[in-house]
Image (spheres, grey):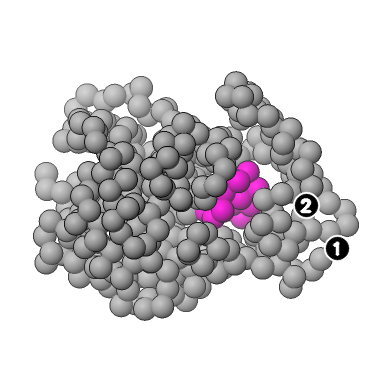
Amino acid sequence: MSRLERKWDHIRLAIENGHTRSSAFDDIKFIHQSLPNIGISDVRLNQKIGELYLSSPIFINAMTGGGGEKTYSINKELAIAASELELAMAVGSQMSAVKDRTQSYTFEVARKENPKGVLIANLGSEAQLDDAKYAIEMIEANALQIHLNVIQELTMPEGDRDFSGALKRIETIVNGVEVPVIIKEVGFGMSRETIQMLFSIGVQIADCGGAGGTNFAEIENKRREKSLPFFTDWGIPTPVSIAEASSISNISILGSGGFMNGLDIVKGIALGADAIGIAGHFLRILVEKGTEALVDEMQELLMEITLIMTALGVKSISELKRVPLIISGETYHWLTQRGIDTKQYSQRQV
């Protein structure tokens, strides 16, 4: 099977698997504010993450790669939606276009359709510095996302089996490019130890990509003759991963993995994420219902976030990250076992 065929196998299976959401979100509860003392017109959703200015706390996360006309079409429509609502957008892995530059047009269309927007380039941890520079140049990217997908590769029949040297390659890229570098897990979560390692080599932004969204181990198992079921339930749930990651200071945290409604997005930010990336949910709507429906869904999410922030009495994303909340259930037990005091969430004040 070619790389292009494999990538579209992934997308087909991701859509067929339907909606997924981590039950860990239900372990997070807000404390009701009877006197919020603000109106919806007071709420501002803009956010600055390092050198990146975002008009909204949600962004379109990476979801397509491999090149070809389908990649071109999806990147084009996503870029149109991103431009209309001024959302940041990450493209899928550009390695196919790095290796075969005739495929560059399938990614360049994102900048063509969104000339003034925030675009994020994307490569895997096998990438070298020259690969990173070309990927950034290809779409005139404002940042570069390097994805980590060890469990997917190990489950994939034709996947990589050697991950040595990845940290050093990332360090070389961080020091060798002129845009911010975001390290992203593809759906199995990042521990605070991983975040600390990344911070030690100069990484300033990490997308913890928790378990609960698109399950690439499940997808790869459907492509195997003999499955590896132990990887299907692998990983750190998204809310847990955000809490673990945000326990490391001086690094910006992005959350992703199973976000499909405004309440979960607000919970993710309140736990410590600076912004929330959505991939599978947006892709499914685009493929099944079209660009107009996708724009409508994005607008609905932004309105939900605004209403919830109004109910909590917070005017900005920075204030939202200081609202008190209660953590219970398996999420509480996990964080307690990991030495993270959940009272820091319940006792804080805006």
Disc 2 residue type (three-letter): Val
Identify the secondary structure beneath mark 1.
loop
- Which residue does the image show at 46% across and 31% down from the upper left? 193
Work out whether residue 63 or residue 322 is closer to the camera in this orientation and state it: 322
Q: Dividing the picture into quarters, in which one does residue 304 lie? A: bottom right
Is 14 located above or below residue 162 in the figure? below
Q: Residues within 10 Å of mark 2 (few under 14, many from 20)?
A: few
- Residue beneath label 1, please? 37
Q: CA distance from mark 1 to mark 2?
A: 13 Å
Whether residue 176 sits left or right of residue 249 in the image: it is left
Location of the N terminus (image quadrant): top left
Work out whether residue 68 or residue 268 is closer to the camera in this orientation and state it: 268
- Residue beneath label 2, please? 350
Q: Kindly report the secondary structure that dominates the magenta region of the rendered protein.
A: helix
Name the spot of residue 235 as percent of width and height, x first: 43, 30
Q: Dividing the picture into quarters, in which one does residue 137 lie? A: bottom left
* Label located before the other in sequence (1 or 2): 1
Q: Residues within 10 Å of mark 1 (few under 14, many from 20)?
A: few
Query: In this picture, which residue range is highlighted in magenta?
Result: 262-276
Disc 1 residue type (three-letter): Asn
Name the spot of residue 149 as percent of width and height, x first: 32, 39
- Which residue does the image show at 19% across and 66% down from the upper left? 104
